[in-house]
Amino acid sequence: MQAKTKYKVEICCGTMCYIMGGADLHLLNDYLPAALRQLVSIEGAPCFGNCDTHEKIHPCVRINGVELPNASTRKIVDKLIILENNDLL
Amino acid sequence: MTYYNNAVITKRELLVRLIKLLDEDTLFEKIDRIPLEMRPRTNSPIRCCVHKDRAVIKYKIMALLGFNIADEQDELTPLSEYAVQAIKGYEQDGNFLTVVDEACSSCVQVNYTVSNLCQGCEGRPCQVNCPKDAIMVLNGKANIDHQKCVNCGICQKACPFHAIAYLPVPCEESCPVKAIRKNANGIEEIDFEKCIHCGKCMTACPFGAISGKSQILNLYYNIKHKQEKTVAMVAPAILSQFKANSSQIINAIKEIGFDEVVEVAEGANLTTDHETQELIERLNEGASFMTTSCCPSYIEFAEKHAPELKPFISDTPSPMGYTAQLARKRFPDHKTVFIGPCLAKRKEAYKNKDVDYVVTTEELGAMFGALKIDVNIKTDSNPDTVVRPESRGYAASGGVTNAIQAILSSEQQIKTELIDGLDKKSIRLLKSLPKKNALGADFYEVMACDGGCINGPVNIAPYKMSQSKLKQAINELKTVESVQ
Ligand code: FES
């Protein structure tokens, strides 16, 4: 069994998120700083159910259960760094 | 290659919105609201003001509906009027790209600019060497006169401080055949005497000012209202574009409402067989080499820029060509719809009466999105066993060569070479081949996109992911083979 990681990143694999830039998020692992890589697990998840709004929120991810709309690899990495830094304080 | 950027996302959002409205039967009433909804007053404008932003959206829609922006007669014509025509099918003129002039920011009028590294030196080599007398020194800093500058670049080379920077115009820079340049108003214009529909300018422009002309509304209207029966011809590259296996992707395509689905890889079986035979014959007859014929952008390149290459191009139909023949035979009263990652296929389809529609990966994704089709639904259907694994491999550079080598006997081995992407350098090489086959290969595989179709201009998945997904799609067939 794999040890539980500190940060769980769930990428919405629903179609809307996928076509609105979510496809690129699946390369997230390549962009994680080395120090974080061990601490993060990346998973695909079915549609978060955010599809019916008219607002522009795709693509969505969840980091430890908290949703991050309009995600990009940059944003996710930044968020993880903030979380980790806060934790070290 | 398409990098993820906001202009790409805007295009996809537009496609999704249009298909949604069409699906809800409210296209004509609501299409003119799209610019307002997408660019509300409350947001800070991307350009000078919200009205400009809305106009840009309007013209992007018009292009997607299949219209040349330049043909606009009356600026007050509402989108709904264009939409009425679009669902009937726009009149094709053989050119499938258009510049959305409203969106073109006419960026970078002159390719050279003096940065603040300029020391205002005494020698002033920039000024002294400028052949057009375009440089003036004002307040101790060199300035380039845009009226006089001819972009020769001598000043840049002459400056000992490297203070003069080269500013590319992304679309012009990306075009391998110099088919796009500014008109008198500074707006980009495509010269269709030269354009080979490779789509590189479209992916390069960060304003999203170059648009493909889509047939998607016409097609989806007919599917939804059961106006015609359709058969989807799915290019192997499509199987690399979603996070699902090939059976799931094909099922999702059926769910849109296509009556039948065939894999273009089935046609690729035939291309491989005929092209191999043709190659052997030609070499026996003393030809110095032969090139592939399946990349439509390369074909258009040869027609427009290197007619001397034409005798060396295989006469074998492309996988799309063969698949369309098969589809017509099997389903004579169906319309044929090619689904692929390529803009230039529109041109090939335009010349081939067996292909009725062309849909891009992005448009397919937009249909999935708008119609809420989940590609990841479980399925137990098995992959098509008539398709050879190598035929799916056509989607990546080197795939055609690999398929041909797989059926050659060991004594027939040939020397092959891959032209991976049309750019200035490979174009020079290609043009030199008829005179002197310098690389000495018998067979040249030519792909306009580096990496092949999986790196096409209208794809969704990033290239790296497409590579691994294509491998997976190929392996699915191998496991089926070994089970049998
Ligand atoms: S597809 Fe991501 S929220 Fe629905």
Image (tube, coloured by chain):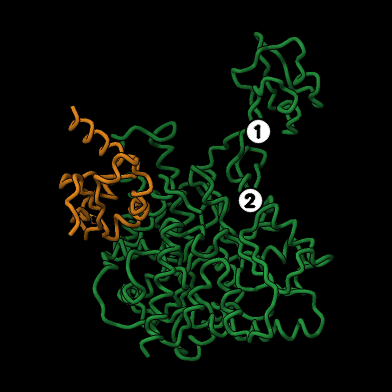
Chain colours: A orange, B green
Q: Pick the residue in front: B483 or B184.
A: B483
Q: Amino acid at mark 2?
A: Cys
List x then y, in percent, for residue B37.
30, 46
Query: In this figure, which residue is indicated by the disc labeled 1?
Result: B111
The image quadrant where one finds the C terminus of chain B is: bottom left
Residue under the point 54% across and 44% down = B101
Tell me if I can see residue B326 in this picture: yes
User: Is residue B71 left or right of B233 when viewed as pictured?
Assistant: right
Q: Work out whether residue A84 or residue B40 is closer to the camera in this orientation and state it.
A: A84
Label 1 element class: loop
Mark toward the start of the polypeptide (1 vs 2):
1
Q: Are marks 1 and 2 on the same chain?
A: yes
How packed is label 2: few (under 14 Cα within 10 Å), some, or many (20 or more)? many
Q: Give the letter of the chain under mark 1.
A: B
Tell which subunit mark 2 falls on.
Answer: B
Q: Residue at x 75, y 64 (%)?
A: B439
Q: Along the line of sight, which residue is nearer the eye, A5 or B221?
A: A5
Q: Which mark is residue B421?
A: none
Residue B83 at x, y percent in the picture: 41, 60
Q: In this figure, which residue is indicated by the disc labeled 2?
A: B175
x and y percentages locating residue A32 in the rendered image = 34, 43
**Kind of residue at badge 1:** Asn
- The residue shown at (63%, 87%) is B409
Q: Is residue B85 in view from this perspective?
A: no
Classify mark 1 as within 8 Å of ligand 1 or not, answering yes or no: no
